[in-house]
Amino acid sequence: MQTLRNELTFHLAAEAAQIGFWERDLITGQITHCTVTAAILGWEADRLSCSTHEVDEIIVPSDLPLIGERLQADIASGQPFDMEFRIRRPNKELRWIAVRAVGVHDHSGQVVKVSGVMFDITDRKLTESAMRDTEIRYQLATQAARIGTWEQEDFTGDTHISPMAAQVLGLPPDKTLLRRDEWIAMMLPEDLPKTVALREQSGLAGPSF
């Protein structure tokens, strides 16, 4: 009875987290899965089995060869493996899927099944893409405006600088870190007191110049 309760709790938690379960028979090519997996793939909730060919048909063609190569190598290793790929749902919606699985051996040690879980990671992929796009636009804007960026470590006084900041300062573009003593050496002596005052006003806790 306790085992049944644990199993039920496990499946409820997995459903709430939108974790899809599936198992592929390597002999027959048949795949069985849960309702969450069906929803992730864009299928009807009562469609709880399919063939490997049916899944291959919804995977983006350019992702399919890599999946085949990875699958054979990872199954042979006997270790759990992860893959990310894109699918095209029946309604033509493009989704990113993450799969984690492991081979299941028979009594002779041969891998006869692959059992795993599936997640829809589309939102994460879109966020990562948006962040990359924002970073690219930011870099293009700062380069066009010749704006150098920097970030100073509070307690050491060391400063990380961008390639444009290095250029503005007359330094090699691969110079990405300015030590505290390097900053001091670059400053005009008459500007040093003002820099110290600004640093104190900013509330920085590190060593003053």
Image (cartoon, grey):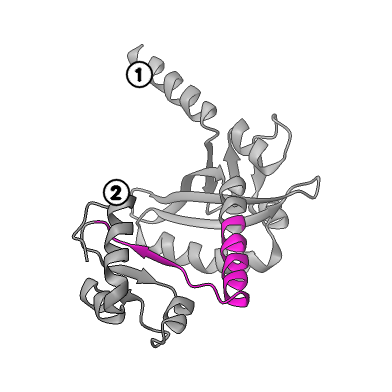
Mark 2 closeness class: few <14, some 14–19, many ≥20 residues within 10 Å: few
Question: Is 48 part of what is drawn in magenta?
Answer: no
Please state which of residues 73 and 59 is positioned toward the viewer in this rendering: 59
Q: Going by the image, does 106 lie left or right of 58? A: left
Q: Image point 25% across, 78% down: which residue?
A: 182
Q: Which residues are magenta?
A: 130-154
Q: Nearer the viewer, mark 2 or mark 1?
A: 2
The answer to whether 27 appears left or right of 42 in the picture is left
| Residue 172 in view here | yes
How crowded is the residue under tag 1: few (<14 C-alpha within 10 Å), some, or many (20+)? few
Q: Residue at 39% of width from left, 84% of height from top?
A: 174
Give the number of callouts.
2
Residue 85 lies left or right of residue 189; in this view the side is right
The image's mark for residue 203 is: 2
On the image, the x and y values in percent for residue 177 come to 31, 75
Query: Residue 3 — which label?
Result: 1
Question: Are the two marked residues, 2 and 1, in contact with CB atoms closer than 8 angstroms?
Answer: no
Task: Reply above or below: 205 against 63.
Answer: above
Q: Hey, which residue is sitting farthest left in the picture?
A: 207
Q: Amino acid at mark 1?
A: Thr
Q: Residue at x 46, y 68 (%)?
A: 149
- Most foreground residue, 184 or 35: 184
Whole-number angstrom distance, CA of label 2 to CA of label 1: 59 Å
